[in-house]
Amino acid sequence: MTHETDVLLVGWGPVGQTLAILLAQHGWRVTALEKQPAAYPLPRAVHFDHETARILQAAGVADAMADGRIETADFYEWRNGKGDVLLRFVSRPMGVCGWPEANMFAQPELERLLDEKARSLANVTLLRGHEAAALTETEDGVRVTARTADGSDATFAARFVVGCDGANSFVRGAIGAPVTDLGFFYDWLIVDVRPHVPKLWSPLNIQVCDPQRPTTLVSGGPGRRRWEFMRLPGEAIEDLNRADTAWRLLAPWDVHPGNADLERHVVYRFQARWVDLWRKGRGLLAGDAAHQTPPFAGQGMCAGLRDAMNLAWKLDLVLGGRAPECLLDTYAQERMAHVRMMIEFAMALGKVICVPDPAEADARDASMMATRDPQTTPPLPGILAGVLRENDPVAGKVCVQARVRRGAREGLFDDVVGRGWTLLSADGDPLQALPDELATWFRSIGGIGARLGGDGDDGAPIRDLDGRATAWLRENGAAVVLQRPDFYVFGSAATLADTPVLVADLRARLAAPAS
């Protein structure tokens, strides 16, 4: 028997879970194959940014995470072995996307929430103990054979398959996607600890750039703490990856078996890689199957959830016949550039800390301390090319999400007003500016309009409670912005009267995505 579905996912980590939820919200049938019989119970990723939080908001789990499951970071400080500050990243309590810019968490808790949300949707089917073993493309989709826990085979037919199956991806190998490896790799001992008594760490996250032992100290979410220790030249992995070694390295921080539990210790090789082919026919890749980044920028899982958000709205339009299949080619175009920027940024940070030579470290310190102000804000790159309006200064930026009130309801914009293709303006109702035919088309792709105003603006149905969205529009010189479903700006209009041209440009771009 062949099991039929719209989209088949291989892998059930945060990327596959989020993509399943987003697609199911659009009404598509999603089947996920996961070779592991149960969820992995130990920590892995520990950080997500405000844009990722907005994606989790779209998936319906951000509020639950914010309810005691995250620690908000203030600074991310880089110090040398003497304690001098080399670099300090500032994380604001509210980013452009309406969430804190740096959130520390435990991955098993996030996966549990995503799993519960996905399982609550009738059109999501999760099959654990199913390992994908063969993939062939058919005339109208793909066929995947999976080996089940009892040794039998099961066959699945889908219009598309997405490999969310990690660094050793089966789908990546099946579609023959080549990998670019930047040759930047280091072995680090990862140690996750649960202290018996909470301790206030300020700053919350620290990199100790000491050539005697480069070390990371970060939150692992409420009630957890993570240390990472770089393997030194000549040090054997089997000696490093021992519980007694972990306790010995933790001792200088006054962490010992008497005041903490050792939750996990493992030697992990940090790498910098990406695939050069994100899509082949009906097969696509997302998350670690498509890219791996060193952890120093905290963007590994964030990148994967951006993949899911980007791919979800494009698959929705293609599956619904509202856009040609070649729209999916813009997935790699948009995400590859973004991923490369973040990997290169993480590598640059890694080259600061991964220095075991004292003389080289002294030269690094002198160069960095010559900078008068080490304080900076982590970059949040937008989209450089793809489904964007050409020659538009706002296109590709992450669009603001403010707290608003409509009627009796108050909260973040996406929850109160809605999400998807959104015309946003503080100058009037942008939907009313569209001719009927264009408004009908815009609504057919899920488009909505929103007129913002302050409490003194009786004509505005949506109150911009703190003025953030209105200020953001004015800072960008836009009377109207057209936000994509993944929260990036497609384009802008200088006046309300220019809104029809903006929406017509979107229709033309979706009809012919390639540029």
Image (cartoon, rainbow, N blue to C red):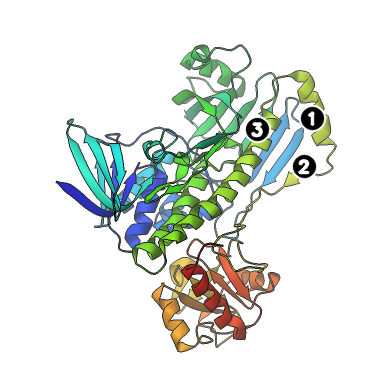
Residue 109 screen position, x and y as percent: 39, 42
Q: Report crowding for label 3: few under 14, some 14 to 19, many 20 or more residues within 10 A (C-alpha).
A: many
Q: Element under label 1?
A: helix
Where's the C terminus, which quadrant? Answer: bottom right
- Residue 126 placement, left or right of 366: left
Residue 345 screen position, x and y as percent: 65, 41
The residue wearing badge 1 is: 365
Q: Nearer the viewer, mark 3 or mark 1?
A: 3
Along the viewing direction, whichever of 492 and 459 lies nearer the viewer: 492
Along the viewing direction, whichever of 140 and 246 lies nearer the viewer: 140
Q: Element under label 2?
A: loop
Disc 2 and disc 1: Cα gap in Å? 12 Å
Q: Tag on residue 374?
A: 2
Disc 3 and disc 1: Cα gap in Å? 14 Å
- Residue 437 placement, left or right of 343: left
Q: Is residue 243 above or below residue 193?
A: above
Q: Element under label 3?
A: helix
Give, as a three-letter code, the residue at label 1: Asp
Q: Are marks 2 and 1 in contact (CB under 8 Å)?
A: no
Q: Report crowding for label 1: few under 14, some 14 to 19, many 20 or more residues within 10 A (C-alpha).
A: some
Residue 421 screen position, x and y as percent: 48, 70
Q: Are marks 3 and 2 in contact (CB under 8 Å)?
A: no
Residue furthest to the left: 1
Q: Nearer the viewer, mark 3 or mark 2?
A: 3
First reached walking from the N terminus: tag 3 or tag 1: 3
First reached walking from the N terminus: tag 3 or tag 2: 3
The residue wearing badge 3 is: 350
